[in-house]
Image: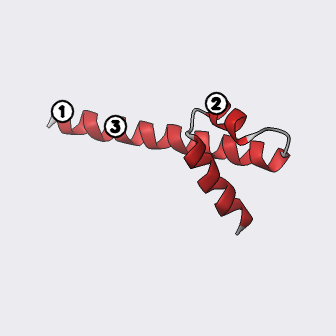
Amino acid sequence: MCKAMEDLWNEAANEGKKESQREAAFRMLAAGTLTLEQIAEFSGLTIEEVKQIQKEKAS
């Protein structure tokens, strides 16, 4: 039971981190001063993830 709770905790923490990274990338895209490569580097996301956020922002 303890291992299951630890796994759930870690999964929630990872999801929170990923959401923070996505929000940061969204703000960087909105600023419009950085390249996709720079945003990926600074946010810790992949370029593909940044491109997906860019598509979401456009719609």
Q: CA distance from mark 1 to mark 2?
A: 33 Å
Counting residues from the start of the chain, the first of labels 3 and 1 encountered is: 1
Q: What residue is pinned by disc 1?
A: 3
Tag 3 secondary structure: helix
Question: Which label lies toward us, 1 or 2?
Answer: 2
Quadrant holding the C terminus: bottom right
Q: Position of residue 26 (x, y in %)?
A: 70, 48
Tag 1 secondary structure: helix
Q: Which mark is residue 41?
A: 2
Seen at 67% across and 30% down, the residue is: 42
Seen at 71% across and 60% down, the residue is: 57
Q: Residues within 10 Å of mark 3 (few under 14, many from 20)?
A: few
Total label count?
A: 3
Q: Amino acid at mark 3?
A: Trp
Q: Please, is residue 46 above or below residue 49 in the view?
A: above
Q: What residue is pinned by disc 3?
A: 9
Q: Residue 33, located in which quarter of the rendered image?
A: top right
Counting residues from the start of the chain, the first of labels 2 and 3 encountered is: 3
Instruction: Using the image as rendered, state which of residue 10 and residue 28 is in the foreground.
Output: 28
Counting residues from the start of the chain, the first of labels 1 and 2 encountered is: 1
Q: Amino acid at mark 1?
A: Lys
CB under 8 Å between discs 3 and 1: no
Q: CA distance from mark 3 to mark 1?
A: 10 Å
Q: Residues within 10 Å of mark 2 (few under 14, many from 20)?
A: few
Instruction: Using the image as rendered, state which of residue 41 and residue 23 is in the foreground.
Output: 41
